[in-house]
Amino acid sequence: RLKHIVQLHLQQFPCLHGAIVPIRKCWRRSRYQTLGQDDDEAEEEDVIDLRQEISRRFGQVLIRVGLVMLAAVTILFVVRQEGVDAAFWEKVDAGVPLTAEEQADEFNRDSPVILYVAVIEILVCGACAQTAASMYSRRRHAMKHPADWCEKDRKFYVKVQLEKGLQDQRLFGLGFRPSSDGLECLIVEAIRPHSLLDQWNHRPRDLSPEELVEEALGLDDPLGDDRPLEVELADSPRGSAEATNGAGRSEERSNEGNSATSRTEVKPACAVVAVNDVAADVGLMQVQLLRPKVTLWLRMDVGLANKPLIREDGQLDVAQMQAGAIANSHLELGAAGSQAETQPSPTVLGQAGDVENGAGNSSPPAADACDGPLCACLGLEDEEPQVLMRWTACALIFGWVTLLPVLLVQPHEERPRQQLIRQYLLKPCLFILPIWVLLWLLDCLEVLLQHQIMSPLFYYGICHVVFPGMLAWYMIQMQAADERLVLEQRKAREAEVGSTIPMVVEDPSPLFFKELVHVNPVALMWFGAVASIPILASSLLTPMETERGRVAQCYVHSVYGPLVFVQMAFVYLL
């Protein structure tokens, strides 16, 4: 009973309860979150990734410290407000001017409110560290190729094999976008009608043994009226099949696993996690798509993959498309109406030929070898660290709060784009961050002890003028290096694959410049007040190689040029 009472009271203090109870779990190895899969489905030892454990533990500690500080600041604020007499509040309500001593006392009483800002900074830093650890922990498909998993775990993936002739210039018809920030997959956005992948989607299902016997004997309905005559195939390997009989009655039959009466279709929002023998590498997976024979491994239970975009009345579900942000869907109303009535006959993908189909199936008109686009749009580079670059840009305003979680992320040993952040920012931050954190602690002590330790001019001049200017130079140098690295990767991998298919791709995205321009007006003014002069000077001294990068620089110059006067006014006020 005493133990129950203690546990019940400890639950009211999440910080203490979270620090005492899980001590035995500190040395356990935790499983990372899988791509659209529950944790209880993966229990094998070889899917554990501990590369981001330091960042995760650091975030947990900061969040618990922040909760303790939040309670302490609240108590301090209440205690200081209790010493105020009623005469003072009457004087304030009456609008009587306060003396200098009374104004100083009022500021000292309200000064703990400023410490709430420090608590928020600690909580934000801890949350960013844990978020970065979750994003850049390797997923299941990154730890082991889906083909190497056992049959129990392989059921979560769908295998799609496509093949075309060596001289065939057609594309597979897969529209996708590469993922970002450690997900390492290709997100399906559209499937071109009449393409090889669209033919795979509309392949005829395999008949069950009962249906084969029925077809051989010429029986229409040997099992009675309750047997469905038409079967609409499910979207998921573990989905349900909707069946309707001749009188219009319908029922749902649950299919576990890949049954003989189920058919899987590749739809928008699916995730391609592996192509051929390459897994969890968006650049090399795109290289494999240029080969005449590919094997795709997909996760179907991601996003809106199992939610149809065509309603039962044959109309397009616009709300569903808007919710999933799926543009240029491959489902057309006319094509959907004709495909609902007929099913294509089996044919060898990539080759023209007519094969007779059973059970009343008819084949759609075969697409000509020259139909569709003959130019592939493939980037071939590693995925973009978009969130890390956004936090890095925010470090010009918030300092160590968003910069420290970025530096704690352990980059992938085979992803040079992730390594650029440490390569350009780690050495200067070894000097900047300790001083930055020390000055922040001294500033918090000043507010807490109500005693001036350093001049405000010194604190704001160092933390909000000098350090942001130094970081701006290294960040723009990192942006130029990222652009060169992407161009080198594209050139090397395009020469390696030696494909005859023409390729076109836009210039690399200038991530850092985009974060400086695509920002809300309040943050834009803060950027200009603390680092507009260093940003302009660094940009002018660091030319970009691509035209897209140079255009982005022009936008940065036009936006931050007038903000130079804002920074000069900010320095003057200090």
Image (cartoon, grey):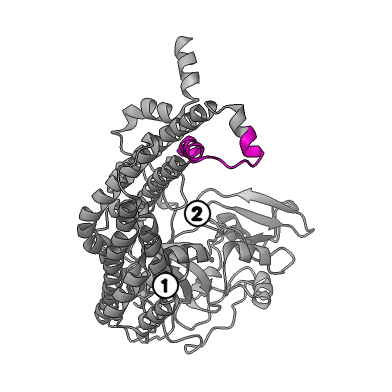
Q: Residue 218 placed where, x, y %? A: 66, 64
What residue occupies the far bottom of the structure in this picture? Answer: 370
Q: Quick check: 487 above or below 370?
A: above
> At label 2, which amino acid type do we have?
Asn
Please state the extent of the stretch shown in magenta in the rendering. Answer: 90-112
Q: Is residue 562 visible?
A: yes
Q: Main secondary structure of the magenta part?
A: helix
Q: Quadrant of residue 57?
A: top left
Indicate the secondary structure of the residue bearing disc 1. Answer: helix
Residue 266 visible in rendering? no
Q: Nearer the viewer, residue 99 or 35?
A: 99
Residue 363 in the image: state x and y as whole percent: 59, 77
Residue at x 57% of width, y 72% of height: 327
Quarter of the image holding residue 27? top left
Local secondary structure at mark 2: loop
**Residue denoted by label 1:** 565
The C terminus lies in quadrant: bottom left
Identity, as a three-letter code, of the amino acid under mark 1: Phe
Q: Which residue is mark 2?
A: 258
Q: Residues within 10 Å of mark 1 (few under 14, many from 20)?
A: some
Residue 15 vs residue 532, the one in the foreground? 532
- Specify which label sits upstream in the sequence, 1 or 2: 2
Residue at image location 26% in from the left, 67% down from the top: 474
